[in-house]
């Protein structure tokens, strides 16, 4: 995903939520203070089946899908749920809002963590990222990338994991622990899940793919460019 392709979608997200680009850019620049270049070859998924583990309550019953995959990219608290099921992950994707201690532990053990900066998590970036082992941190932004802060597309932890897996050559994507209609979330999170759904629909069309998690839902989705 080139930023030129992502930028129009990003602008639509900003407009929908009333977010400011400048705030995202400030957060990106704070994260850049702690970021080191990351060798993406460490996440090479060429020809592999990648499980994109989401944080829905269903994940505990779907952990086997992750266990059977070649590679596991997990969003935030999905790492902890999978750990309880005896499933390790190859990458954690997080904006640091729920379980930063898990992210720190993973980096200390050599597992990469994609740490994301956006407009309203600057305090979390300043508090937590310096405690991580920087060698194992992949710094990401939803704004224009700079220096060692990357942008592979995506908005929520889960769909950013999918875009990253696509960038790294994944042949197939599976989606344990996803529920776009999760009744336990608040209004803003529900809106974010709606965007995650649209973004996955965009990604599958860019790939010429069909994600099972979208089966029965495509007719109700607005296509992105």
Image: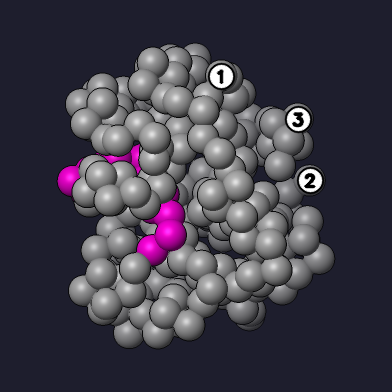
Q: Which residue is mark 2?
A: 225
Element marked by disc 2: loop
Residue on which the image places disc 1: 147
**To which quarter of the image does residue 173 belong?**
bottom right
Q: Nearer the viewer, mark 2 or mark 3?
A: 3
Q: Is residue 17 left or right of residue 97?
A: right
Residue 164 x %, y %: 58, 50
For mark 2, does the 10 Å Cα neighbourhood hold few (<14), some (14 to 19), or many (20 or more) residues? few
Q: Earlier in the sequence, mark 1 or mark 3?
A: 3
Q: Is residue 72 visible?
A: yes
Badge 1 vs badge 3, beta-carbon distance below 8 Å: no
* Mark 2 → mark 3, Cα distance in angstroms: 12 Å
Magenta segment boundaries in residue numbering: 89-101
Question: Could you tell whether 205 is left or right of 126 in the image?
Answer: right
Residue 123 in which image quadrant: top left
At 39% from the left and 40% from the top, the residue drawn is: 136
Residue 169 screen position, x and y as percent:
69, 57
Task: Classify 45 as above or below 99.
Answer: below
Residue 58 sits in quarter: bottom left
Determine the CA span between mark 1 and mark 2. Answer: 27 Å
Residue 126, relative to residue 133: is it above or below? above
């Amino acid at each position: 995903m080139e930023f030129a392709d992502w930028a129009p979608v990003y602008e639509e997200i900003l407009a929908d939520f009333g977010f400011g680009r400048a705030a995202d850019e400030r957060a990106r620049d704070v994260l850049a203070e702690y970021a080191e270049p990351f060798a993406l070859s460490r996440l090479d998924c060429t020809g592999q089946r990648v499980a994109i583990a989401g944080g829905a309550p269903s994940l505990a019953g779907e952990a086997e899908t992750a266990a059977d995959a070649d590679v596991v990219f997990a969003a935030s608290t999905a790492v902890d749920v999978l750990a309880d099921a005896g499933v390790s992950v190859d990458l954690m994707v997080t904006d640091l809002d729920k379980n930063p201690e898990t992210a720190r532990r993973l980096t200390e053990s050599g597992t990469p963590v994609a740490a994301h900066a956006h407009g309203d998590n600057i305090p979390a970036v300043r508090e937590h990222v310096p405690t991580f082992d920087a060698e194992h941190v992949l710094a990401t932004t939803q704004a224009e990338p700079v220096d060692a802060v990357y942008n592979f597309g995506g908005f929520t932890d889960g769909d950013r994991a999918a875009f990253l897996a696509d960038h790294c050559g994944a042949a197939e994507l599976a989606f344990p622990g996803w529920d776009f209609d999760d009744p336990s979330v608040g209004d803003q999170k529900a809106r974010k899940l709606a965007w995650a759904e649209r973004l996955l629909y965009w990604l599958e069309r860019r790939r010429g793919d069909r994600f099972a998690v979208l089966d029965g839902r495509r007719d109700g989705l607005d296509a992105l460019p």
